[in-house]
Image (cartoon, coloured by chain):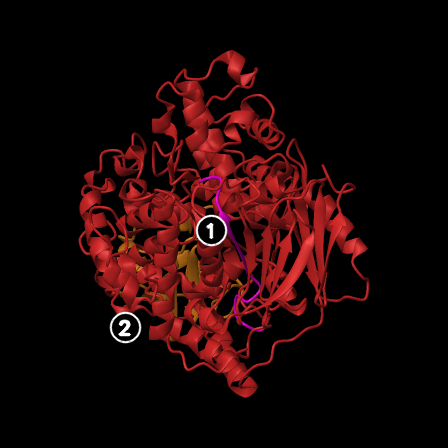
Chain colours: A red, B orange
């Protein structure tokens, strides 16, 4: 096996209780590398179309890459891939923390979980030995309690260990339940629900194994170069100084903050909320994994009042936007508290905030009766309703039981035309950036494999507005300084290349913020070559990115998704109903179909169906 | 003393010129520069950029000089120092 890898995959069958070890396949490794790439290859081969995402036939894969190493910028991450209960199609999520490198220290590059257990169990993997353990004592406990207990049960002399677990929301199969690495989350797409359905409550890993580098000296040189690049970057300083929440004021001002369930794209409260956070809630910056050169994390605490909240890592932009602007809540203490509750109960903060604002929209428009909301006042801006509804969702009580399905399926249950208030793509709720002020973002939301997420599409916003090119101009992306954020022309072609480059952190299971801080495909290729011994450059790595995007697309097409599922909700295409951008015609996406045509053509996909062409599949060695 | 102020492409839309030379008191500090930055004639500093109560930039603006981020309001500046204002727009 190539250097760089641990060389082993652990397969755990929960139905039989059998654990087995397989070798990493050298050909698959070279073609798909790791992370969401290698996992896509396995899921496409092993999960047949039409299986129930909550059924025993679905599989859940924790995936790393040869760059899942604490020395590598962003190397603390892990990718989790599965068929998503939100989309009934491709599902993936990335978590920060140290789980990725610790899974490798336990001796494995990937962990495949299949089948379903009759009783609650958790998996412990230490120094190459896997054991399924009874989890009766963990059932019903929150994420912090589970994590504390399992860490206590693991060998005290084991210095490097990590736990990922689900909370009560996962146990109760809330569709957007997350898999938590304490305060870090593999949050989107509902991996926590898949774990809950399989009756596996946690995975604990640790060990002392080390990968061999093909050329250790070259690897260390490439890593040092990458770390220096990141540390020199102003984005690194910016993230460390202000965290992601600083986007609140800028996004609000520039029409990038979805407000009132996407009725508007600006609110006017962003600056005040950011100031309040900095002054009253922020304790200190922190790193999500050991060795991060950025340290964008925020240790937060609400010291007093109705929303008193203990110290935890939180206050992320997406979370606070979802619990403020989405619902018109002006209380930052409450927003941070709600983020904490989501961590504690194991729910994706974006989907949770989105589904509550959807319910507020339905309530205000008379689609939900007083009886249905069980006395909860779901008027816009009612702060008190937020934690109440979160609890109802996490524990599937009353209306919460319907909202726990996510906005698409909840709208189907509620009916009465509520579908138009359900803002999602492929079943995944929209994140907290608004494409009406960035057309590349809009197309990214529509075409991302897992739906309207905050990771893949948002590169479009940073390109359009932030003028970041991620080192991709040499691969065909236009100079962002020449691109007007409001314009639509040419952005289909730009996005096709942006996606091929910006999927690389997910294939490498690294942090995407390193791309903002100057790490390019060439940096990744340099580190990968040195550790694996491959002769791979940025161009070939982009080809890997394209191959993985196409395989994820095939996975989705096989589940009957196609062009119709790449469309944006009408509200997102339309002029904002209120706020400073209300009458601005530029705040619409006028020719979305044309954008999609251009993107498909640039991707080598059939314009009518959105399916990869045979020629493209042959070019990528995916034709079967 | 004179401070040379430069702007990145995102910040340029808030200032009338690409480079500004500001006069602050000799041996001045970063906080003295803030007094001037917030009051440049014809500049348009929205609330999202400028915190008028505390007389300093809000969040997304980085103040850099010589490849280093200036954070301390009491940092001493020197005559002829070039300071760049950069605004990062990234997804969070």
Query: Nearer the viewer's eye, disc 1 or disc 2?
Result: 2
Mark 1: give few (<14), some (14-19) or many (20+) Cα within 10 Å.
Answer: many
Residue at 42%, 58% (x, y): give it.
B61
Q: Which mark is residue A302?
A: none
Q: Reading the chain from its start, which is encountered first: label 1 or label 2?
A: 1
Residue A441 percent coordinates (x, y): 32, 50
- Residue A492 in the magenta stretch? The answer is no
Q: What is the C-alpha distance between the residues marked 1 and 2?
A: 31 Å
State which chain disc 1 sits on: A
Question: Does the rendering let one see residue A58?
Answer: yes
Residue at 43%, 66% (x, y): give it.
A32
Q: Residue at label 1?
A: A246
Residue B42 percent coordinates (x, y): 26, 52
Q: Secondary structure at mark 2?
A: helix
Residue at 55%, 79% (x, y): give it.
A3
Q: Is A620 situated above or below A356?
A: below
Q: Which mark is residue A474?
A: 2
Q: Secondary structure at mark 1?
A: helix
- Residue A82 in the magenta stretch? The answer is yes
Q: Which residues are magenta?
A: A71-86
């Amino acid at each position: 096996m190539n250097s760089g890898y641990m060389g082993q995959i652990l397969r755990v069958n929960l139905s039989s209780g059998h654990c087995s070890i397989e070798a990493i396949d050298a050909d698959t490794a070279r073609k798909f590398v790791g992370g969401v790439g290698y996992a896509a290859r396995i899921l496409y081969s092993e999960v047949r179309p039409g299986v129930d995402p909550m059924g025993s036939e679905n599989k859940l894969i924790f995936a790393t890459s040869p760059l899942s190493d604490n020395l590598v910028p962003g190397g603390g991450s892990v990718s989790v891939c599965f068929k998503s209960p939100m989309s009934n199609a491709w599902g993936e999520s990335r978590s920060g923390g140290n789980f990725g490198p610790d899974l490798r220290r336990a001796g494995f590059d990937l962990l495949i979980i299949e089948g379903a257990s009759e009783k609650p169990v958790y998996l412990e993997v230490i120094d190459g030995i896997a054991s399924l353990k009874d989890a009766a004592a963990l059932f019903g406990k929150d994420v912090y309690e589970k994590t504390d207990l399992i860490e206590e049960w693991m060998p005290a002399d084991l210095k490097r260990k990590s736990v990922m677990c689900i909370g009560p929301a996962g146990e109760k199969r809330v569709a957007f339940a997350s898999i938590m690495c304490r305060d870090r989350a593999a949050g989107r797409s509902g991996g926590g629900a898949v774990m809950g359905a399989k009756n596996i409550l946690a995975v604990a890993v640790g060990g002392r194994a080390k990968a061999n580098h093909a050329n250790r000296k070259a690897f260390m040189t490439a890593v040092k170069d990458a770390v220096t690049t990141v540390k020199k970057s102003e984005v690194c300083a910016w993230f460390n100084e202000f965290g992601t929440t600083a986007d609140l004021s800028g996004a609000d001002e520039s029409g990038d903050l979805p407000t009132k369930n996407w009725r508007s794209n600006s609110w006017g409260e962003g600056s005040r909320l950011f100031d309040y956070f900095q002054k009253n809630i922020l304790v200190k910056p922190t790193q999500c994994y050991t060795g991060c050169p950025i340290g964008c994390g925020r240790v937060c605490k609400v010291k007093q009042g109705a929303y008193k909240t203990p110290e935890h890592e939180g206050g992320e932009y997406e979370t606070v936007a979802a619990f403020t602007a989405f619902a018109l809540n002006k209380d930052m203490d409450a927003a941070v508290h709600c983020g904490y509750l989501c961590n504690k109960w194991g729910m994706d903060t974006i989907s949770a905030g989105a589904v509550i604002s959807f319910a507020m929209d339905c309530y205000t428009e008379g689609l939900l009766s007083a009886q249905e909301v069980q006395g909860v006042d779901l008027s816009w801006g009612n702060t008190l309703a937020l934690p109440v509804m979160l609890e109802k969702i996490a524990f599937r009580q009353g209306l919460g039981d319907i909202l726990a399905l996510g906005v698409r399926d909840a709208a189907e249950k509620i009916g009465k035309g509520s579908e138009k208030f359900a803002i999602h793509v492929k079943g995944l709720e929209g994140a907290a950036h608004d494409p009406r002020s960035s057309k590349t973002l809009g197309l990214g939301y529509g075409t991302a494999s897992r739906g309207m997420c905050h990771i893949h599409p948002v590169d479009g916003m940073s390109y359009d507005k932030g003028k970041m090119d991620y080192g991709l101009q040499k691969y065909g992306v236009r100079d962002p300084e020449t691109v007007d954020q409001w314009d639509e022309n040419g952005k289909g072609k730009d996005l096709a290349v942006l996606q091929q480059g910006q999927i690389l952190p997910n294939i490498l299971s690294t942090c995407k913020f390193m791309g903002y801080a100057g790490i390019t495909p060439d940096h990744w290729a340099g580190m990968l070559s040195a550790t694996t011994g491959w002769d791979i450059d940025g161009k070939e790595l982009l080809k890997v990115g394209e191959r993985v995007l196409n395989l994820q697309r095939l996975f989705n097409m096989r589940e009957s998704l196609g062009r119709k599922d790449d469309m944006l909700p009408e509200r997102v295409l339309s002029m904002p109903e209120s706020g400073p951008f209300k009458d601005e015609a530029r705040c619409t996406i006028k020719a979305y179909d044309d954008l999609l045509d251009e993107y498909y053509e640039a991707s080598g996909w059939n314009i009518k169906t959105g399916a990869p062409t045979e020629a493209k599949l042959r070019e990528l060695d995916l034709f079967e | 003393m004179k401070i040379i102020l430069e702007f990145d492409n995102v910040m340029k839309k808030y200032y009338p010129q690409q480079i500004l030379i500001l006069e602050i008191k000799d041996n001045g500090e970063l906080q003295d520069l803030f007094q001037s930055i917030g009051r440049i004639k014809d500049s348009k500093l929205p609330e999202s950029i400028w915190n008028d109560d505390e007389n300093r930039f809000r969040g997304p603006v980085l103040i850099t000089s010589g490849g280093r981020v200036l954070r301390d309001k009491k940092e001493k500046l020197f005559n002829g120092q070039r300071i760049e204002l950069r605004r990062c727009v990234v997804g969070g």
